Amino acid sequence: MAVTQVAYEVDGWGVGELVVADDRVVWHELPWPRAGGTEDPSQTPTHPGHGAGRVVSREPSRGSTSFVAEAIRVLQAYFAGEPAPIEDVPVDLEYETAFFGRCASALRTIPRGEVVSYGELAALAGAPGAARAAGTFCARSHLSIFVPCHRVVAADGLGSYGSYGVAYKRRLLMLEGYPDAL
């Protein structure tokens, strides 16, 4: 498997990280302001080396350079507020359970500017009543933005957004035009 890991910068958001294998995104780290301007990916809230079981090379692989450049262009357009086709970028939807895979597929169909509750996501994934399991899926997601877990909200409000925090989630929803993100 050919693997490429790259950092990318987005004005006003910080530096993100993208891991691509065979022209599919297998990991995406949201842009985050780096402490002291470092390019060390361990300075982000999470990192693919933490529990992902993957060994990632920083050397670009052959044949994926144009895919990586296009994925970064789409991400930069998205974070600039443009209607970028995030849902068209090929991603690795292989998860440890079939339910998690169905959650990922269902989330990719939720349009920009709309949200679903954890219970609604569970129902869309074929398991009504499994809201907590849908929450576990979102907490463990490694494809932020491409599998838009920020579009999943609690029944009584926005809910959390892991180590990024609710302010980051609110900012993403506002970027997408969700009117109730305030």
Image (spheres, rainbow, N blue to C red):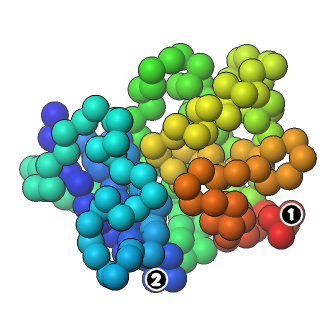
Q: Quadrant of residue 173?
A: bottom right
Residue at image position (51%, 17%) is 97
Q: Quadrant of residue 50?
A: top left
Residue at image position (39%, 74%) is 34
Q: Residues within 10 Å of mark 2 (few under 14, many from 20)?
A: few
Judged left or right of residue 2, residue 117 is right
Percent across and percent down for residue 75 are 45, 64
Residue at image position (23%, 54%) is 5
Secondary structure, mark 1, is loop
Residue 120 badge: none
Q: CA distance from mark 2 to mark 1?
A: 25 Å
Query: Between residues 110 and 8, which one lies in front from this camera angle?
Result: 8
**Amino acid carrying mark 2 in the image:** Asp
**Amino acid carrying mark 1 in the image:** Asp
The residue pinned by badge 2 equals 11
Residue at image position (31%, 59%) is 42
Query: In which quadrant of the rendered image does the C terminus lie?
Result: bottom right
Whether pointer 2 and pointer 1 mark residues with C-beta atoms closer than 8 Å, the reply is: no
Percent across and percent down for residue 6 are 25, 61
The residue pinned by badge 1 equals 180
Judged left or right of residue 110, residue 147 is left
Is residue 178 in view from this perspective?
yes
